[in-house]
Amino acid sequence: MAVQYDVEAGDGVHPGKPVTVDRYTAGARINHWITAVSLILLALSGMALFSPSLYFLTGLFGGGQWTRAIHPWIGVVLFFSFAGLFLRFWKANLWKREDGTWMAKIYDVLTGNEEKLPEVGKYNAGQKMVFWSMSALIIVLITSGIVIWEAYFGNFFSLTQQRVAVLVHAVAAVAAICVWIVHVYAAIWVQGTISAMTRGQVTGGWAWRHHRKWLRELVTPKR
Amino acid sequence: MAWENVIPNPPTQPVKAVMSERNLVKRSASSQALPAEPMTPVAKLIDVSKCIGCKACQVACLEWNDMREKIGINEGTYNNPEDLTPASFTVMRFTEWVNPESDNLEWLIRKDGCMHCSDPGCLKACPAPGAIVQYTNGIVDFVHENCIGCGYCVKGCPFNIPRISKVDHKAYKCTLCSDRVAVGQGPACQKACPTQAIVFGTKDDMKKWADGRIKDLKSRGYKNAGLYDPPGVNGTHVMYVLQHADKPEIYANLPRDPKISPIVEAWKGVTKYAGLASIGLFAAFGFLHYLVAGPNKVTREDEENAERLAGSK
């Protein structure tokens, strides 16, 4: 029997018509949504300071001074919140042999020909790439963000370090927003996904179609 | 000598202020074309060779701008305060330099402060519309009610001049006494200088004044005397006469060829456009993909397979 390498705490399957599958615990969902709200607020406040054409977004935060003051603190919230998600999800996101095959067949992924794809565990290669790229980007963002946090760290770093940090922060933020678009779009496109993060459950058919290996592990009695 | 007394005295009668929104040539984080009314470019010329380090300019600056500096501590140099602060827009930087040619100790005293670049890095970096403005006479000014305290101007500045107040979180620097210049007066530091080491007038007049000073210095053995008006920032509206213009670094690290850092140019240039474009492309790809491929739906067959696998009764 295959080792249950990517079943996470709280995952479970309930036979019935239809079958329901527990995918995310209440803790994981709350953790996710704190991260999600932080990321959206960070994107809005960050974009406001990134491009003059989006400066009007500072109005959402009570003006420019408030936006400047609050953005780094939301970043701190996101960092710790995402760290929670990382600890929950990293193991099931380790790269596996079938992930390479899945990526090689990205055309079949995009055209919805799932019968041509290898069976995958709790996360497919796309989700794993979202996970790892977000993890890396958030480390880059918090590090570069501290260097340019004028109110507290303005005197700690040289001007060259600050200039590099502000450029790195902008590039990493753009990349994070692009990854976020992929993440959100995939959740909308692959129907039946969003309930995983709202009610914590998906249908058996969803698990069969998209994460069959995970479903097989769940129905196999634990030894 | 010919270069003496070429600068007219300021008016003694009240005059109408001439600098206003109509005279702005650049406004931070704003794309609209400014119908700038031209003014004659002005400049402050600081003749390092004539400075006696009395700090009258620092006092006049604090007084005119109604700023108070904390009582500091002796850092082991004559610099007081040790660096520019949100209150001290100008600081005398003292350097003891031994001239290797003459073996003389030379006391180089450079009055540091905003250089009022023609290509201001602070203004380029600023994200807040109208927080930094440049007038057609060359003065670069901070408009504090628009400032958000992000510190981007600090990163943009090639001279490390702006300072962010810990009290109101706004950026401060020399205004070139734009309020005085608007009514025909010279800046407070120039007014207070007892040796005419600081002079103020039109940029052309200041260059002529500098020429005379440089000739004088050369006649007295300073063969490398020259004007500091760095072309990397399209010239500045605060210029120095240096005894050793070939070695600006000896004057407390005055940059040899200051220009806006290429990192800042990349951040405010290609990154901004490429960044917004990539975000747009990702969103557009998602939208188009949905139009072409449609939603990825779970089928009845998938559910039946799952029921079989889970052993549903």
Image (tube, coloured by chain):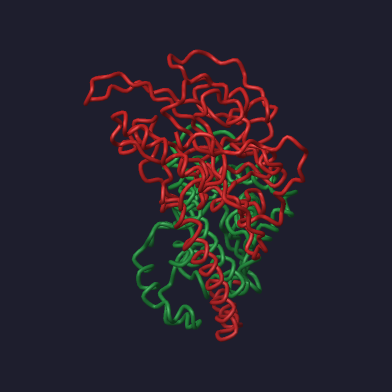
Q: Residue at x 50, y 26 (%)?
A: B83
The residue under the point 52% across, 32% down is B198
Figure check: B161 above or below B70: below
User: Is A16 rendered above or below residue A40?
Assistant: below
Q: Nearer the viewer, residue A59 or B171?
A: B171
Position of residue B270 measured from the top left corner of the image (x, y, whole percent): 47, 63
* Residue A192 image-quadrant placement: bottom right
Q: In the picture shown, does residue B39 fall above or below B142?
A: below
The image quadrant where one finds the N terminus of chain B is top left
Q: Identify by letter the chain in green.
A: A
The reply to whether residue A27 is in sight is yes
Q: Colour of chain B?
A: red
Q: Position of residue A140 (x, y in %)?
A: 46, 49
**In the displayed structure image, the side of residue A110 where residue B214 appears, left or right:** left
Residue A158, image x and y in percent?
43, 37
Name the residue nearer the viewer: B18 or A197. Answer: B18
Q: How many marks?
A: 0
